[in-house]
Image (cartoon, grey):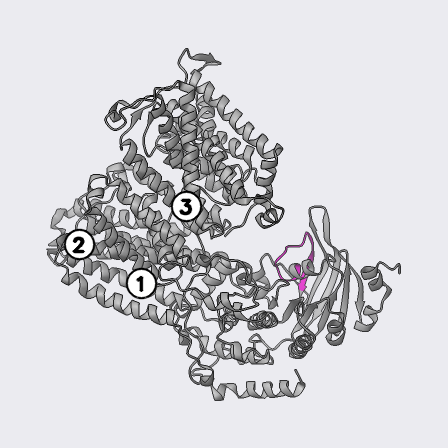
Amino acid sequence: MTSQRLQEIRRRYAALPRLGVVRQRRAFQTAGTRGRLALTCVTWIAALVVPLAVPSAAWRQIFVLMVIYAALASGLNLLVGFTGLLDLGYVAFYAVGAYTTAILTTHVLVARFGQAFYSQDLWWVPYLAIIPAVVFSGLLAGILGYPTLRARGDYLAIMTLGLGEVVQLVAINWSGLTGGPAGIAAIPPFALGTTKLFNPLAVYYVALVIATPCFIFTWRVSRSHLGRIWRTIREDELVAESMGVRSSRYKLYAYVAGGGIAGAIGVIFAHSQGFVDPQSFTIDVNFLVLSLVIIGGSGTIIGPIFAAIAWVALNQWLSTTQLVQAHPEMGSFILSAVVLVVLIVRPRGLLGSGPSLARSSAGTALRTRSPEEAGFQRVRPTLASGPVRGPRRRPPAGVPGSSKEPPASSGILAGQALRCSFGGVHALNGVDMQVRAGEIVGLIGPNGAGKTTLANVLTGVQRPTSGSLFLDEALVKMSRPSDAARLGISRTFQLIRVLPEMSVLENLLVGSHLDVKRGLGLVLGVRAWSGEKALTERAVAVLELLGLQQRTHQLAAALPYGDRRRVEIGRALMTGPRFLFLDEPAAGMDTRETSELGEIIRHIGAQGIGICLIEHDLGLVTSISDRVIALDRGTVVADGDPKAVATSPAIAHAYLGVEP
Amino acid sequence: MQYLANGIVLGSIYGLISVAYTLIYGVAGIVNFAFGGIFMFGAYGALYALSPPKSQVTRFATSLGLPLWWAVLVGLATGAVVGFIAERVAYRPLRGRSTLTLLIASLAALIMLQALGQFIFGAGETPYPSLAQGKTINLAGAVISQTDILVIIIGFVATGLLWTIVRRTPWGRAMRAIAQDSDTAKLMGINIESVIIGVFVAGSIMAALSGILYGSLFGSASPTMGYTPGLEGLVAAVLGGIGNLPGAFIGGLFLGLTETLAAAYLPNGLAYQDVVAFIVLVLILWVRPQGLLGLRVRERA
């Protein structure tokens, strides 16, 4: 990359806010997403009209069930599909919602007023019960979610399974409150004024009204920054943390959101059935809801809803067949068999369309990852479509990406007497190191010298066994990568960790996490509220700096190797760092790519960002570094002028074994 | 003392299922919930081999009327066959897929097995004969039946045998190789599919064995009898550090003891017996995410 070209890019960047980025907008909807959109519309219209047209009384009964299971599956999808948190105890939140309203309306209302409470102008209480139901189940989700935060995968599944069982056993045994194994009967039905709603169709429409906000919520979240952060956590929690995301907190949000939805649906269940008992909340129900998420298409919005409708219909149809009427247990046998077959035949679920583009593109080494885990819906382009309205939060200073205060030239990041041991291996053995703002420090050394460990310690990924870290001469503690990101220290990884199933632009927007405005915009995906328009422009500018503007909307997995490296640098820049650690950014790059990379790094450094460049390519290191530090077996063996270090006897000893 | 003895007996049964879970998880990475079903099929297999239960005479008119120990073998064989089929139908087509898919598949398998059990054996409870008659023994104030002693001995022996196989035979070495790195194992010429199917059969035999012991200990069998012990066995496997054979058995003993003692000494303990198990699980996983004795956590999420 020539310096003329850089000049030109800088000029274009300066002009960006005026020009807007309309030109960049590109049709992004694939046939799959368009198909799903059409299906969504059809489903909604059908949801309103079809029940009216069904003549059979038996079938009219089941529409409420469809709403219940569709909403439960959507809520669980937030946990499983978006955040990647297995939950085999989800049904507990549903139970809590149902029991809350059951206890409230029977023990409190009916006990006080009898059935007469309808005429007491209290008929609206069952609707209001949604609020405590959501609060209790959300609260429980937070409490139950907390101890499971550390576990993942199978362990998480087993823990949640246990918690679900505990809730069920409490429901069975706390007879005074829950009615024990028999449950609570005679729960008053929904009502409008003094008219009790017994007509299944009326109940259905009430349920639809209650559940619709849940559906809208999941849909909006899927398009919001919150949804993006959840998907990042699912794909790679370390990346999320490195971008400043408090991942435990966001996982808890997922629990609370999913739990809250289940609580609201529990209210529908209780009042439409008229009773609640522990048998309604067994692991079989949880298995069912989880299956609906997976066979519908985990991470899609419409998939679980569709699966729920199909399942309830199938179940109803089965119950009319001779075999199932003679042997009810065969109904669950057949349904489980159907689930199994769908799992085998449609790995991404019935409506999950995966980014097949990523898989078929030649020459990209994909991280192996199962389709289900990754089978989420592609998100609409978040590129701003017009000129910026409203003030930017902060004017971009220097480099596109540094949204923090203009870096003080006195800024300094220092580690003192850093030690880090793994078992008996001393990866770092008393290392002192400093990076100043605007300085490019090359960090070299043979494999196993402790370079990456040093970077890990300075970016909060690894806690040092002993030693201290100073930022601007103040002692700092970083217990997690997000702490480092919040202090303005960002990084890339030795093994590429782009988020393969997100677009390049989205990868960068994950990096802007710390600048996204908190509040409803974060949740509901309203870009004007979250400041995302400005952030998108910043991302576009960063992409231009990196020469990736043509790639903006491509999936990261589809990029060639060198471009993925650059996406990672761009993502780190989006956090607005004061210090940037690049862990072997040129590994696997050819000479041309490497020299372009050198230009980019030099340009970033010129903006006052302190850079620590870990690299084996000594040519690159000596040509762009202001200073080089050489590590060998956990200690600094040389520190100073690049040329001097490169020719020093200590280096010859470290690499070649020549005695100094 | 009596509670202690009861706890160890119950714990031996949990331990056996737990060993089965741990074996398959270690090698194939599957939490095989279907063991709850295999447990039940094993128990019924032995029961039918011995004599058809009275209530079912109409459907299975002929009694095999085999001697006790042959009947037990038939039960184990039933378990092995069911395990084999479950692996072929539910897991092999899904090899290499995500944790979530495999979990759902195994839950589906459990539900299918339970439904089949109800279909074949009828929904109700069936009386189950005791493995060993004879006098009870008084040991330091605890009354122990011969069945109890048999359960404990079989539990220890079977676990020890399996552990020896895993540690000492080429087949066991192949298992351990697959557990650590299945791709490399394949490159070294290990036939992964045959080892995995073998592991499934071995695990299923353990589950069937514990089903038979459970049935004879409590004197009854039902199509859903495997559900709770199956979960407890899983909890025990996790406590022991999933993938760790002796750990799993010890986890089973620990869980059996905890539950029995909790049932005895906590207020209303009998009702909350299972709650205690799960709370212990959550607490231990919270403090030690890799299990009590677990060293190596396989991240498959």
Q: Nearer the viewer's eye, disc 1 or disc 2?
A: 2
Is label 3 in contact with label 2 (beta carbons under 8 Å)?
no
Q: Image quadrant for the C terminus of chain A? A: bottom right
Q: Nearer the viewer, residue B149 or B93?
A: B93
Residue A607 located left or right of residue A52: right
Seen at 81% across and 69% down, the residue is A646
Above-or-below relation of A349 to A564: above
Quick check: do tags 3 and 2 share a chain? no
Q: Amino acid at mark 1?
A: Phe
Q: Which residue is mark 3?
A: B90
What are the residue bounds of the magenta stretch? A457-470
Seen at 22% across and 57% down, the residue is A127
Indicate yes or no whether the magenta region holds residue A458.
yes
Q: Which mark is residue A59?
A: 2
Instruction: Please give the count of numbered marks on the rendered protein.
Output: 3
Q: Position of residue B21 (x, y in %)?
A: 48, 38
Q: Chain of mark 3?
A: B
Residue A511 visible? The answer is no
Distance, label 1 to label 2, CA atoms, is 23 Å
Distance, label 1 to label 3, CA atoms, is 32 Å
Residue A402 located left or right of residue A19: right
Distance, label 3 to label 2, CA atoms, is 32 Å
Indicate yes or no whether the magenta region holds residue A204.
no
Residue A616 located left or right of residue A223: right
Q: Nearer the viewer, residue B216 or B112?
A: B112
Q: Which mark is residue A215?
A: 1
Q: Nearer the viewer's eye, disc 3 or disc 2?
A: 3
